[in-house]
Image (tube, rainbow, N blue to C red):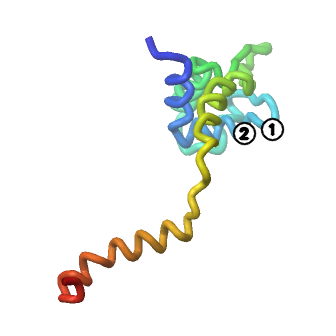
Amino acid sequence: MQSSLDQIFMALADPTRRAILSMLLEDDMAVTDVAEPFQMSLAAVSKHLGILAAAGLISQEKRGRVKWCKLEPDSLRDASVWMQAFGQFESVNLDAFERFLAVELAAPDAQTEGEWP
């Protein structure tokens, strides 16, 4: 059986599911409203919603004939705590890293041209 942390990260790995979570940040939504902006079938969106629900990231309830989705932000607590452990490291200076990579990637070319001993 998958741990809840594994399920959460698996659910978050898909860009469609992350987009759905972003939409639900605003308010609860009917399944049909969640599906509207996506170029996929309602069944495909429902499958994404099922994965999010299994991970505990959303809840679904039927109100009359309409199924509604609600974000469950507390479910991200374990993942957040796990990720915060990595916050102790300094953030990477991406500009400096890009310059470093440019030099390193250029080095093999320079070596073939006889610039390196």
User: Height in image: 24 above or below 65?
Assistant: below
Residue 15 location, x and y as percent? 55, 43
- Residue drawn at x 72%, y 39% is 23
Check disc 2: other Cα within 10 Å, few if <14, some if 14-19, many if 20+.
some
Compared across the picture, whether 102 is left or right of 8 comes to left
- Residue drawn at x 81%, y 33% is 27
Residue 115 vs residue 30, the one in the foreground: 115
Residue 42 location, x and y as percent? 57, 31
Compared across the picture, whether 20 is left or right of 2 comes to right
Check disc 1: other Cα within 10 Å, few if <14, some if 14-19, many if 20+.
few
Quarter containing the C terminus: bottom left
Residue 96 location, x and y as percent? 53, 70
CB-based contact (under 8 Å), mark 1 and mark 2:
yes
Residue 23: assigned label = 2
Residue 67 occupies quadrant = top right
Amino acid on which disc 1 is placed? Glu
Compared across the picture, whether 109 is left or right of 63 comes to left
- Distance in Å between CA atoms under marks 1 and 2: 6 Å
Residue 61: assigned label = none
- Residue drawn at x 41%, y 74% is 102
Q: Residue furthest top?
A: 1
Quarter containing the N terminus: top left
Residue 26: assigned label = 1
Amino acid on which disc 2 is placed? Met
User: Height in image: 15 above or below 59?
Assistant: below
- Residue drawn at x 53%, y 30% is 9
Residue 38 vs residue 25, the one in the foreground: 25
Element under disc 1: helix
